[in-house]
Amino acid sequence: MLTPPFSDVSRSPRFHVAIIGGGITGVTLALGLQARGVSYTLYERAPCFKEIGAGVGFSPNAEAALKAVDPEIHAAYKRVAMPNGEDWFQWVDGYSSDEVGYKLYLGEQGFQGCRRSDFIDELAELMPMKNVRFGRVVERVEELADGMMRIHFGDGTVGEADVVIGCDGIRSRVRQLILGDDNPASHPSYTKQFCFRGLVPMDKARKTLSEYRASTRFMYNGPGAHAITYPVSPELLNVLLVISDSNPWSTTDGRHTARGRKKEALEAFKNWHSSVRAIIDLMPDDMDKWAIFDMLEHPAPFYSKGAVCIAGDAAHATGPHLGAGAGFGIEDALVLSELLEAVDRAARMKGGKPRAQICRDALSVYNDVRYERTQWLVGRTREACDLFQWRDKDVGKDFEKFGKEITWRFHQIWEYDLDKMVEDAIQGLNSKVKSNGLLTPD
């Protein structure tokens, strides 16, 4: 087979990783490999780095994972993160009383928000562009006779690597390739919820909500919908309106966004307290609405197959309700960075197992370490939305019961032992390659 022109094929004896997707998970993984001296190429279908969505916040586990992947990544986040006015997440009866019903401590300066685009721009500054290929749409991946993986792109170019990591989001092509196009788990399911997202000028938000409410993280609970607000910069307040709707999603072309208008949001919140409707009034008349898809109904049965794996939303896409999806992708990036560093070292040793087999062992261990926790999140996130929207039959509008339920979920997310995760992964790989601890990190 002739290699197409402008390909990324280079027959180097060095271990090499291909990352598909330049969102938060993919870029974090790339920087984690870079910090560990592991060779990689990142392929992104867009012409430049960009992030879908307005705001993002990182919980304590996510911040700890950022630091562990590479302290420079955490420093980049802190450069664009907006401190909250106080260290509490507060839930309000947004339907009738407008009173705070429950407060959850976030930790000192915890769960700070930022604009997704600002964060990805900071990360891009850390990445050498020689390691990035834009405009590359994956069509298929094949295994060569020597165990190397060849990636075929829509523009006729190819790339080769020892392992392929799909960080290509909720509509992942890599997931389709490892599970099969006809497998229901290759495609996410509509959760019967959609949302409006927007960034509101902070000066208007302060006048409408008060300085206090515009300065920190609030959620407004109520029947069939909920709203969340938090600052993402000194000039901008992020607003997310989540609406449950039993109708099928309105697009038929596979897109998760559709044209919407403010009056649709006002209609969904028409009987709510005036404070919530005032928030909606701050948003523009024309707004995109975003369908919330996840992988609860048809979960991926595994995250790795041979020398190919999936991470982040490609593996375990979930709704935004617990604010943990991006953070779990960063946890994925951490364990993959550590495992692939170990593979890189092992690949340089004489007399060890064949490189191709070590790669497959590492991705199998990644699957074992990450599967249970990430699948847990998908289900608990659906439950959280029921709690916010008063659909939980045992909790309803009772804020005391609500507090117990939501605190347990958040603490399961936040209080996670990343060191043990990495230790378990390295021990698992050592066991598979039977190298008597030779791969243990320094």
Image (cartoon, helix red, strand yellow):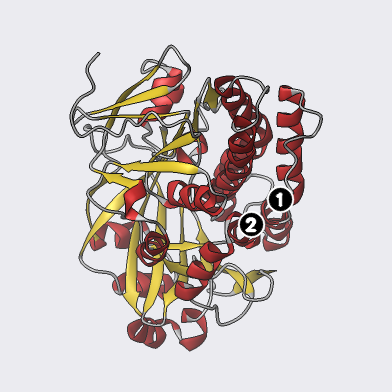
- Report the Cα–Cα distance between label 2 and label 1: 9 Å
**Which mark is in front, 2 or 1?**
2
* Residue 2 x, y percent position in the rendering: 22, 17
* Residue 77 x, y percent position in the rendering: 49, 67
Residue lying at the far right of the rendered structure: 436
Which structural element holds mark 1? helix
Which residue corresponds to mark 2? 68
Residue 52 visible in the snapshot: no
User: Local crowd at mark 2 within 10 Å, few (<14), some, or many (≥20)?
Assistant: many
Residue contact between numbered discs 2 and 1, judged by CB atoms under 8 Å: yes
The picture quadrant where one finds residue 143 is top left
* Residue 421 x, y percent position in the rendering: 72, 43
* Residue 55 x, y percent position in the rendering: 41, 63
**Amino acid at dot 1:** Leu
Q: Is residue 377 above or below residue 28?
A: above
As drawn, is 305 to the left or to the right of 116? right
Which residue corresponds to mark 1? 418
Nearest to the observer: residue 44 or residue 132 = 132
User: Local crowd at mark 1 within 10 Å, few (<14), some, or many (≥20)?
Assistant: some
Q: Quadrant of the N terminus?
A: top left
Which structural element holds mark 2? helix
Nearest to the observer: residue 83 or residue 24 = 24
Q: Is residue 57 above or below residue 340?
A: below
User: Residue drawn 26% across and 37% down?
Assistant: 136
User: Residue drawn 58% across and 67% down?
Assistant: 111
